[in-house]
Amino acid sequence: MAGERPRERPAGRIKFLVCIDDSQECRTALRFACMRAQNTGGKVSLIYVIEPDAFNLSGSVQEIMAEEARDQARAALEECAGEVFEEFGVRPEMAVHQGDKANTILKTIEEDESINILVLGAAPEGAGSNRLISYLSSQVTKRLHIPLTIVPGDLDDERLRWIT
């Protein structure tokens, strides 16, 4: 609500939220969040948002496609979680949601008061879509009441270690 003061976030361990997809910049953002969590005793939460299809199909075909999308999302989260635990010793929380990506992320943050920082990866110029970053950046003063960390997607591990 406009002019409404954000709720107080609970003190304690910092929780980083990372939106998972198949992009390289997402992996860089995840590595950044894990390194920060490891260095601060924090937590990592992974969200995979399945965006609605742009076309309508018959009920049973749509249901099959939705189930396949959920299976792919869970597999992607499991893969990331395994890599995160193996390399950083962090067991991330995982969630799959369906809807508009930006609004779903904002709603997740509004509903989970333990999330302290949203971490997104920015695609190097000309290498991908930064639509989510553009949208969320414009919403900072409206709905996002936690820090938004945007990590350049082309940072290597040495640079990530240096800044975390």
Image (cartoon, rainbow, N blue to C red):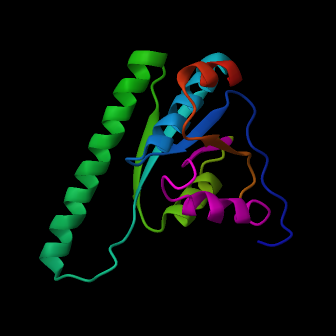
- Residue 155, quarter of picture: top right
Magenta region includes residue 59: no
Residue at the (72%, 65%) spot, across then down: 138
Q: Indicate whether 103 appears above or below 147.
A: below
Write the start and end of the magenta stretch as one range: 117-143
State the quadrant of the C terminus: top right
In front of the other: 57 or 110: 57
Measured from the top left, where is residue 79 in percent x and y? 31, 33
Residue 10 appears left or right of 78: right
In front of the other: 61 or 21: 21
Measured from the top left, where is residue 90 in percent x and y? 48, 22
Q: Residue furthest left?
A: 60
Instruction: Tell me if I can see residue 89 in this picture.
Output: no
Residue at the (57%, 42%) spot, across then down: 17
Q: Indicate whether 75 appears above or below 59.
A: above
Residue 152 appears left or right of 12: left
Q: Indicate whether 111 appears above or below 26.
A: below
Residue at the (44%, 41%) spot, across then down: 24
State the count of labels: 0
- Residue 86, quarter of picture: top left
